[in-house]
C-alpha cells in the first residue's frame, strides 16, 4: 500500500488552531485525514477553536480571514448571540464527538455559520 507523501496530504489539509492548546483534542482532530492541527496563529490557520470569547476578537485582529469556532461545555443564555456578534463563525460543544467537531470545522472553513443543535 503506497502512502501519500506527507507534503501532499498537508497541502490540502485544513489548518486548525486550538486555543488553548489541548493535546488530547489535537491528537483526535489530527487523525482526520484532511485536518492539520497547528499550535501558532502565525501558521495562518483556516479555522481556530477557542474557549474564551475574548480570544475571538484578538485572533480576528491578527487574521481577519480566520474562521473561529467557540467551544463550550454547555449552553448559556445569550452565548450564541455574543459569539456571533464577536465575529465568530459559530458555537460548538467542547465534549462532543470528534467527528462532529471535524465536520463543524469543515463547514466553518467554507464560510458557513455553525451552531451545534444542542446549543441553538
Image: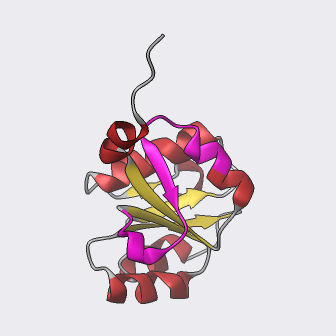
Q: In which image quadrant can residue 52 be found? A: bottom right
What residue is drawn where x is 38% and y is 81%? 85
Residue 16 on image: x %, y %:
46, 59
Residue 47 on image: x %, y %:
40, 62
Q: Name above or below for residue 36 compared with residue 91.
A: above
Q: Is residue 110 visible?
A: yes
Residue 108 or residue 14, whichever sits in front? 14
- Report whether 100 appears left or right of 114: right
- Report whether 66 appears left or right of 54: left
What residue is drawn where x is 50% and y is 44%? 102
The figure's colour scheme reads secondary structure
What residue is drawn where x is 52% and y is 52%? 116
Q: Is residue 88 visible?
A: no
Q: Name above or below for residue 18 compared with residue 30.
A: below
Q: Name above or below for residue 89 compared with residue 82.
A: above
- Report whether 107 appears left or right of 38: left
Residue stretch rendered in magenta on the structure: 27-45
Amino acid at each position: 500500500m503506497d502512502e501519500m507523501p506527507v507534503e501532499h496530504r498537508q497541502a490540502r489539509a485544513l489548518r486548525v488552531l486550538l486555543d488553548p492548546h489541548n493535546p488530547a483534542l489535537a491528537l483526535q482532530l489530527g487523525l482526520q485525514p484532511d485536518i492539520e492541527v497547528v499550535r501558532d496563529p502565525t501558521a495562518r490557520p483556516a479555522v481556530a477553536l477557542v474557549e474564551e470569547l475574548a480570544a475571538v476578537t484578538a485572533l480576528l485582529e491578527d487574521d481577519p480571514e480566520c474562521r473561529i469556532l467557540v467551544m463550550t461545555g454547555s449552553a448559556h443564555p445569550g452565548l450564541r448571540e455574543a459569539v456571533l456578534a464577536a465575529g465568530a463563525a459559530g458555537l460548538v460543544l467542547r465534549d462532543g464527538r470528534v467527528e462532529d467537531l471535524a465536520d463543524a470545522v469543515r463547514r466553518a472553513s467554507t464560510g458557513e455559520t455553525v451552531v451545534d443543535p444542542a446549543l441553538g
